[in-house]
Image (spheres, grey):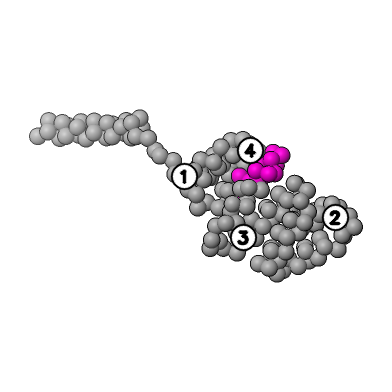
Amino acid sequence: MIEYILMFSFLMLGAMVFYYLYERFFTHRSRTSSDIYMEALKNLLDGHQEKAFSKLREVVAEDSSNIDAYIRLGIILRENNKPAQALQVHKDLTLRGSLASDLKVEILKQLYLDYIDLKEYDTAEAALRELVEIKPKTDGLLLSFLKPKKNKRNGMKRTKQQYGF
């Protein structure tokens, strides 16, 4: 009787070892787009923009509905002196229908910054006007921009600093 119990225990132990080794070495976890997105955000926080950029590109290739990933891609492009490409990314987002108002506001802020970097001040003003239509509490932002018509460039810089854009 003891022989059967020892044999059964030995077989159970062998099965558990086999299962552990199989899970450890032969199964590959597929990373989901949310896992890759989290890695990209960690890379951004750590200051590794190139790694974050490549991971964000993976995310949008897998999940084109991740608007925040597109916004962050555009920000990285602008910060790396590619405002025209950033503008294209952000403009493409405006073509999507049924965006939440907070996403529209964020996209318009990014468009504003893209146009400023491209020195297209009139178009930046139009982006601000559209932002105010969506979020009326930003009237102070628009007014501070519109007042210094004589020196538009300094007005834009002051607007960016004053309102945290």
- Residue beneath label 1, please? 62
Between discs 1 and 4, the one toward the N terminus: 4
Q: Amino acid at mark 2?
A: Lys
Q: Which mark is residue 152?
A: 2
Q: CA distance from mark 2 to mark 3?
A: 25 Å
- Which quadrant: the C terminus? bottom right
Q: Picture quarter containing residue 108?
A: bottom right
Q: Nearer the viewer, mark 2 or mark 4?
A: 2
In this picture, which residue range is highlighted in magenta? 71-86
Q: Is residue 158 left or right of residue 10?
A: right
Between discs 2 and 4, the one toward the N terminus: 4
Q: Amino acid at mark 3?
A: Lys
Q: Give the camera-side residue of 76 and 115.
A: 115
Q: CA distance from mark 4 to mark 3?
A: 24 Å
Q: Please say if the residues under marks 2 and 1 sit with CB atoms less than 8 Å apart.
A: no
**Can residue 25 be found in the magenta stretch?**
no
Mark 3, Cα crowd under 10 Å, few <14 / some 14-19 / many 20+, is some
Q: Residue at x 40, y 39 (%)?
A: 30
